[in-house]
Image: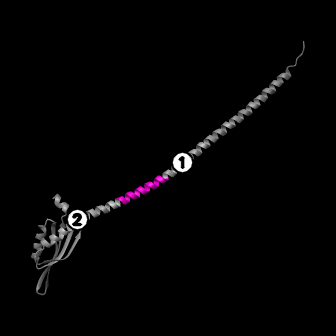
Amino acid sequence: MPRINLLPWREELRKRRQRDFGIAAAVAVVLGLAVVFACIQIWSGMTNHQNERNQLLRAEIATLDAQIAEIRSLESQKQRLLARMEIIEELQRSRPEVVHLFDELADRLPDGVYFTQVRQTGKRIELRGTAQSSTRVSALMRQLDSSPWMTNPGLSVVETRQEGALRQAQFTVFVTQVSASDREEG
């Protein structure tokens, strides 16, 4: 029987398998590194893209904040203008009331009574003056009470002074003005 040595063939097969395994392992490592590198690149690209979008959103938000600030400024300016318009309208409505007030004061003033000072604070009117006697001050109070443009007359001070042969009463009277809108309601 012939002797055949099969060892070199097996040895050669083993070396080829080891070489194939080494090549396959190297290819697997290279492919693994390629996949990892590709994933890192994709994630980096996605992160950069998201950062760009975030930066764009920040810029838009800053623009919108500036517009909101401008709108608030315009709204406050609008409120100030509306308040001014309301004051002007109130003055326009109350303009005839001043005329009625002075007309009523002149109509209701009895003989022998003179005003030296008329001061108005809101609806309250302070009347200072001199009269020939305290009864004329009483007549003034009755006249003011019967006026449709004035209510609640009140006497604060009456001083009678003797100046030579003349005797005069200096007085201070308070009265409340009735506006046209108050007259329409009442």
Q: Can you identify the residue that label 1 sits on?
A: 54
Q: Which mark is residue 94?
A: 2
Q: Residue furthest right?
A: 2
Residue 117 % position (x, y): 20, 76
Residue 77 % position (x, y): 37, 60
69 vs 28, nearest the viewer:
69
Q: Is 182 placed above or below 59 here?
A: below
Q: Residue furthest bottom?
A: 164
Q: Residue furthest top?
A: 1
User: Which element carries disc 2, helix, strand or loop?
Assistant: helix
Q: Which mark is residue 180?
A: none
Q: Quadrant of the N terminus?
A: top right
Q: Nearer the viewer, mark 2 or mark 1?
A: 2
User: Which element carries disc 1, helix, strand or loop?
Assistant: helix
Does residue 148 belong to the magenta stretch? Answer: no
74 vs 173, nearest the viewer:
74
Does residue 75 belong to the magenta stretch? Answer: yes
Q: Residue at x 51, y 52 (%)?
A: 59
Residue 88 % position (x, y): 28, 64
The reply to whether callout 2 and callout 1 are in contact (CB within 8 Å) is no
Mark-to-mark CA distance, 2 and 1: 59 Å
Q: Quadrant of residue 127?
A: bottom left
What kind of residue is marked 1? Asn
Residue 45 % position (x, y): 61, 43
Magenta part of the chain: 62-78
Counting residues from the N terminus, which is met first, the one under dot 2 or under dot 1? 1
Q: Quadrant of the C terminus?
A: bottom left
Q: Residue at x 62, y 40 (%)?
A: 42
Q: Is residue 46 left or right of residue 166?
A: right
